Image (tube, helix red, strand yellow):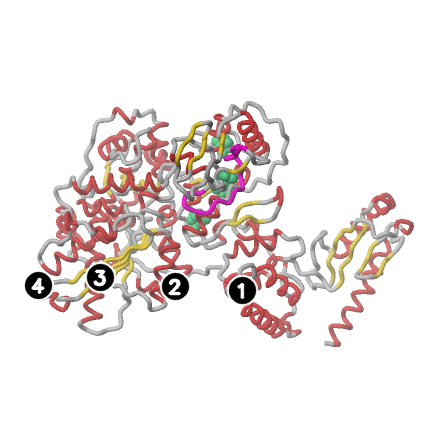
Amino acid sequence: MPKIFVNHKEVEVKADTTILEAAKSLGLHIPTLCYYEGKPPIGACRVCLVEVEGAKTLVAACSTPVVEGMKIHTNNKRVREARRTVVELLLSEHEGSCQYCARSHDCELKEIASHLGIEDIHYKGEKPEVKIDASTPALVRDSGKCIKCRRCVTVCREVQGVGSLFPQKRGYKTMIGPAFVLDLDQVACVQCGQCAAICPVGAIQEKNDIDKVWEALENKTKHVVVQTAPAIRAALGECFGYTPGTLVTGKMITALRRLGFHAVFDTNFAADLTIMEEGTELLMRLKKALVNKEPVALPMFTSCSPGWIKFAEYYYPDFLPNISTCKSPQQMFGAVAKTYYASKKGVNPADMVVVSIMPCTAKKFEAQRPEMNASGFQDVDYVLTTRELGFMIESAGIDFKTLEDGEMDSPLGFSTGAADIFANTGGVMEAALRTVYEIVTGKEFPASDLRLAPVEGLKGIKEASLVIKGTIPEWNFLENVEVRVAVAHGLENAAHLIDSIKAGKAHYHFIEIMTCPGGCIGGGGQPRYTDDAVRLARINAIYKEDAGKKLRKSHANPQVKTLYDEFLKKPLGEKSHHLLHTKYQERQKV
Amino acid sequence: MAVNTKTPEAQDPQPSSAKCGCQANEEEMLRSLDTVIDGFIDTDGALVPILQTAQNLFGYLPEKVLKHISLRLKIPYSEVTGVVSFYSFFSTVPRGKHVVRVCLGTACYVRGGKEVLEAFKKNLKINVGETTPDRMFSLEVGRCFGACGLAPVAMIDDDVHQRVKSAKIRDIISQYQHEGEDVKEAR
Ligand code: SF4
Ligand code: SF4
Ligand code: SF4
Ligand code: FES
């Protein structure tokens, strides 16, 4: 453990750390822009400059390792002045006005500038060419606000394995964007929005659909229902100053009612429904393979994450038959709302508007896929991110913190704990096993507290296996079968997993893929800033929600049972097939 | 598609490729490029030399070739084009058989270089940096060619044309056009 001096104080820090990490462990904040947690530093932005005694120039804290005896100054005059120059230069090339920028409440550049006490800019920089790209349903990119920190390049390429973004051209003409500075809809972008979540400024944001939702709510002829994804309740509080991992389910429901939604429903209901369909589909595939010896696509992959679907359509078209045909819970909800619920309620589906609150920008894309109209109408009309909902509540003047707890409406509002955990990596797998195991054996899933530790947590690729014992007669072909499952989150991890399957190095029956690191709780539409500590806090909150439920298995959901009795009849039945299942299409990756 | 006009294919109608046998030629060139790529598989820093080879083979870097390189090297297309647009020696626009360069150095500019350039633009119906649809001519501007006494000067390939008059430009162009047709027939 090297001893170093930080701001005249002698301290011991862990070996092999950078000045930035050492400072953080001491509770000292050094501003950063290009730094990306867990990735090698690129040292491009220079706002993290610190003074090291004996060094000729100031050094970048993010990329300088500590050495024994180092004397570091993180906040003296020389350091402050240098950082001020760096930030003033950035601002001199920045084309944006904080007064009407959607990032003004959480813009990292603005915060750093204000912490440095910048009141005036002494440089006149050449302003960049401004190109606004609103070509995709999910995102809007504004090159004028881009400070070229390249975080989006890193996340898109190294975390998501996509690589849609890269610096184009050179010098002051540099633009961070797709090939040839094309629009995003011309390239293989999966719409995950991780770039928007990580961008320190307003250069990449979700496409704002708030006004459309207001318009629907104010239209007297429309019946407007809302669904909230499992991951919202563990993160929405952050928009109002709660610490990450605070559950705000009840307040969220009340806030939605106050905004004027006619019915507040739960995507979780549809998550339970998904398990019924997807679990049955898995069993059918296993039966075909093991009993009928028919050729059937295994392993089966989950299908709830639209970024992953689009990724597979570009990069792994061979595996499209392996992906469950189940629509995502968002789309199942829309299709059921505009058919079953509409007729129950006596509302013409043409006059119904379905709004989703999602942690995800890819859901905006998914809702607009042309095939998502099983009800005869676009099944989900508008998708708002968690951030957009937070903004809407605030701009409506609702004091979120003082709201009393509300309850979801019937009949699409009830959910079990299995649905809650759809929000995090490993959760869909656990939810599926809770139900599938019980269908096959008649007994409860034997893991402690219904949880399967090896598939939980932030490791990129996780696997587990269990030997099925005590099957009921219908399923006794599964007796003593070792079921192997795997879980990946972050598409780069997914790609590694699939490559090892392709190479014949790994064999599984069932695989859960979530596009975003940590799963939906780390989605591209969640409150900023999301790092691993925040991800873990949200995951813990979700498991708390699960543990607090009386019913924790999807097949126990009474409202789902009623839906089958009254309407769908049975999983994978004809109605289900039409409303709840879908097809995928190969896409050109370049 | 508004921004797409900058990409090579949009400006590259390839008018007579089927007739003149360029298609087969392109396949051959792709194959020789592949041999080069094979030699580089799993080597770091292979992108720039491969792009140089491709540019030597094709004369410029067509979109199709860039995509091919991206797929073969498993490097994202955005990075391939990022590197191409970083270095000025790479070109994604095909050059014509003849490169017209009009000098806009001070002396030429003062003595009508600007008008000469306009006349070339009008006659060739292209802007600076572009190539005629038949791929015969590209138009560029130069700084000083060192012939200020003879201003205004235009260079076509290696030929220096001195004291160029706007009215004469049609004649100058047609000399080269004619020569080009001969070459085409000879092939
Ligand atoms: S990106 Fe940040 S600094 Fe720029 S206009 Fe928006 S809030 Fe202001
Ligand atoms: S949305 Fe995802 S895939 Fe698209 S550019 Fe952003 S990070 Fe890359
Ligand atoms: S778009 Fe945002 S994240 Fe990407 S380089 Fe620009 S400022 Fe950085
Ligand atoms: S954060 Fe260190 S150089 Fe950008």
Dots 1, 4 in contact, CB < 8 A: no
* Near-viewer residue (A120 or A288): A120
Mark 2 vs mark 1: give the one in front: 1
Q: Are marks 1 and 4 on the same chain?
A: no
Provide the residue designation for mark 2: A317
Q: Residues within 10 Å of mark 4 (few under 14, many from 20)?
A: some
Task: Specify the segment rendered in magenta.
Answer: A36-53
Helix or strand or loop: what does disc 1 sit on?
A: helix
Rendering coords of residue B94 (x, y %)? 67, 61
Q: Amino acid at mark 3?
A: Leu
Q: The residue marked by circle 1 belongs to what chain? A: B
For disc 3, the marked residue is: A282
Sequence-first disc among 4 and 3: 3
Disc 4 to disc 3, how far (Cα)?
17 Å
Predominant SS along the magenta part: loop
* On screen, residue B28 above or below A486: below
Query: Sequence order check: which comes first, mark 2 or mark 3?
Result: 3
**Residue shown at 76%/72% (left/top)?**
B183
Amino acid type of the residue that numbered disc 2 sits on in the rendered structure: Pro
| Alpha carbons under labels 2 and 3: distance apart | 20 Å
Residue A133 makes an appearance in the image = no
